[in-house]
Amino acid sequence: MQLLAPLVALLPALGALASQFPRINNVIGDVRDELLTRPLYTFAPPSTEYASGSSPLRYVENSGVCETTPGVYQASGYADIAYNQSLFFWFFAARNDPYNAPLSIWMNGGPGSSSMLGLFQELGPCRVTTDGLNYTLNPYGWNEYSNMLFIDQPTTVGFSYGTANVGTAAEAAEGVWTLLQMFLSDPKFAHLQRNQFAVWTESYGGHYGPAVAYHILQQNAMIEAGMLSGIKLNFQTLGIGNGLTNPLVQYPQYLAYALSNAYTVPLVNASISNNASIRLSEPGGCLDQISACYDSSLLTGSPNYTACAAAQQYCNRYVLSPLVGDYNDYDVRVVNPDPYPPDLTTLLRSPALTSRIGVPSFVNWSETSYAVYDNFAATGDWMTNSAPYLEAVINAGIRTTLYDGDADYICNYKGFEAVAANLNTKFSSIYAARNFSDWTVAGSPAGMIKNAGTFSFVQVAGAGHEVPAYGNGPLAEGQAALVFFTQTMKGLPITSTY
């Protein structure tokens, strides 16, 4: 994404900001050397005092920003989940039957990325204009079918503010749960307690999604057993787009995608790809270091932060980042810098907008919180394996859809399909026995699909990293994404439409 020159000048040591996975010194997802020996932050679990009863939400209603459909309710503001921990949320009621429609949350990745990216660039009720200065109605916004709750998390991400003291996806899940308890305790939103609940996310959401989903299942079980006071969520659905979930099976696919994809082959010359191949597989190289991170978690119950952070640094410096070359890591059909989707900085720093949606004047929006990113980099959470969480969620009967744009490099479909193929669930044998089939939307080719039980995978043709931001041929931006979203939310396998 292009950025304003003055903003870039403020961050010379960090390199240019990125929409999801930050670049540090021009390395995608790097770990700065000093973080390998930095004392870890002290994680303070969110307060549980608001688990039931009145909710300490602060919000404004019907600001008129973004959703311009007549009669559609919205609210935006803050949940004070703990001391000096204020998470920003933006709720949009469903355009159709909002009282009975499902409730879906949306989280962008990073770690440290604002969910305003998803709201204004992808699937919200509006879409940013090409010049980045305004927005227009999005007819394919996901609140066509579902009530949508966009969450800037953890603290200091996007419009959220306070102390950055979260450094793992599991810790982040606790804050999300606390916000949801507060939200659903508020009299304005309490009627949604009984509605179908869904978690949707992308990118680093390959970690966030499984962790949040698993945490919800655990909390629900404790509430059922009388061990916890709170609101049991009617959790039925999980969706993850272009996710980083199981690095050990995904990292070899960076090389595979760089050498073979539908758009630009190869992404780099033979010298670079050969060197990355050596660094990937040599003794003590990338895969060995990821394995060491995994092993530390299996043996101790928690990962060795230093080993995992070192694996992230090594693999991203010598494998992931070099293999994309000069091409855009979110859409290999273009070279850097890619102006699409348009940058949100000017729009979301405008007092004319922020004052209307309840954002304090001292909050200055950025698409990436480097305080959060550094916390996660110091723990090496990036290189931990979230597949066991995902397997538990699928086996619990949660309808799950993984989707991936085929023009994306950073979490490419080859890697995400490898994640799906390596899952050990009650549907795995069925999934392995089936082939991908063509998928059409409104009769036009839209990609490939595979379904097994309550699990689906969608490879979306002509889409980059932020799948709902893209169209394909006669299909409008977000048209195909709304189809797989709606089908998943209805508890259906992904099928073609005509």
Image (cartoon, grey):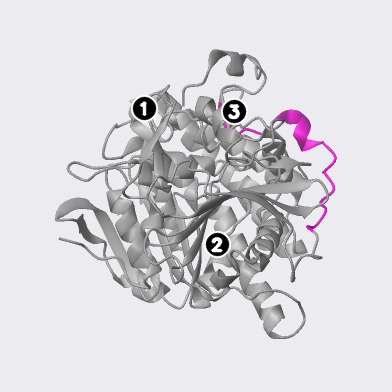
**Which residue is found at the position 68% from the left and 84% from the top?**
224
Q: Mark 2 or mark 3, which is nearer the start of the sequence?
A: 3
Does residue 304 appear left or right of residue 427 in this picture?
right
Where disc 1 sits, the SS reads loop
Residue 76's place in the image compared with 26, above or below, is: below
Q: Quadrant of residue 341?
A: top left
**Dot placed on the residue nearer the N-terminal end, 1 or 2:** 1
Circle 2 Cα neighbour tier, 10 Å, few/some/many (<14 / 14–19 / ≥20): many
Three-letter amino acid code at the position of disc 1: Thr
Residue 335 screen position, x and y as percent: 37, 23
Q: Depth check: give the residue in front, 64 or 345.
A: 64
Residue 351 marker: 3
> Does residue 245 appear in this view?
no
The three-letter amino acid code for the residue at tag 3 is Pro
**x then y, percent, for residue 70:** 38, 51
- Assess disc 3: are there few (<14), some (14-19) or many (≥20) residues with their C-alpha within 10 Å of its C-alpha: some
Report the front residue among 219 and 304: 219
- Which amino acid, by three-letter code, is at mark 2? Ala
Q: What residue range appears in magenta? A: 27-46
Spatial distance from mark 3 to mark 1, Cα to Cα? 20 Å
Q: Which mark is residue 387?
A: 2
First in sequence: mark 3 or mark 1? 1
**Image x and y of residue 40, in percent:** 82, 43
Residue 29, percent from left and from top: 59, 35
Residue at 65% over, 54% down: 169
Task: Find out whether residue 38 is within the magenta segment.
Answer: yes
> What residue would you read off at disc 1?
130
Q: Quadrant location of the C terminus?
A: bottom left
What is the distance, in whole Å, between disc 3 and disc 2 at their CAs?
A: 42 Å
